[in-house]
Image (cartoon, grey):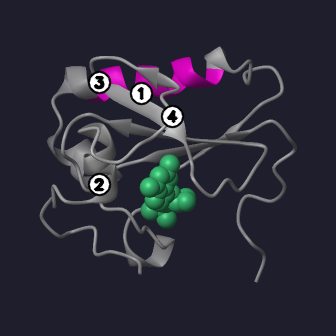
Amino acid sequence: MPIDATQPYDDQNIFAKILRGEIPSTKIFEDEWAYAFPDINPQAELHILVIPKGAYVSWDDFSAKAPPEEIAGFIRAVGHVARLHGLVEPGYRLLSNIGPHSGQEVPHLHVHLFGGQPLGPMIARR
Ligand code: 5GP
């Protein structure tokens, strides 16, 4: 079910549990600001989720409330994960869903990183 991205942060969401180690995940990258792990239901050859360690519902919440060093740290981590996988030269796609129209399901900010293949049109054609 898509979530309402204006809701308060719920620390029982699945990515909060992954960050606390209560639900298993395969660590791809971790630093002070971010944690990256494979999507459980990959939509491309490579499909990684990068999440901030801080408690933010969505990109909207994060961009409005996070301190500058946290924003910089998270964005740098996303770029780092892509470089770690050699994705700069072939190219890759970042996507973050925010609220009902996007179909966001997990109410903890996450950036989807897709790569490893040509990714096709940016959104499904109607
Ligand atoms: P959203 O639709 O919110 O942008 O994306 C949520 C993503 O989280 C989906 O692509 C879904 O496959 C992934 N996901 C949901 N639950 C889990 C989980 O327990 N582990 C992992 N690794 N990914 C999950």
Q: Nearer the viewer, mark 4 or mark 3?
A: 4
Give the spatial CA distance, label 3 vs label 1. Answer: 9 Å
Disc 2 is placed on an element classified as helix
Task: Tell me the magenta residue range.
Answer: 71-82
Q: Nearer the viewer, mark 2 or mark 3?
A: 3
On screen, residue 49 above or below 2:
above
Q: Please name the residue that numbered disc 1 is placed on.
A: 75
Q: What's the amino acid at mark 1? A: Ile
Q: Please name the residue that numbered disc 2 is placed on.
A: 60
Q: Please name the residue that numbered disc 3 is placed on.
A: 33
Res 96 seen here = no
2 and 1 marks in contact (CB < 8 Å):
no
Indicate which disc, 3 or 1, sits on the residue closer to the N terminus: 3
Residue under the image location 67 percent in, 53 percent down? 42
Give the spatial CA distance, label 4 vs label 2. Answer: 27 Å
Instruction: Determine which of the numbered discs, if any, sits on residue 26 in the image.
Output: 4
Residue under the image location 18 percent in, 45 percent down? 55
Disc 3 is placed on an element classified as loop
Indicate which disc, 4 or 1, sits on the residue closer to the N terminus: 4
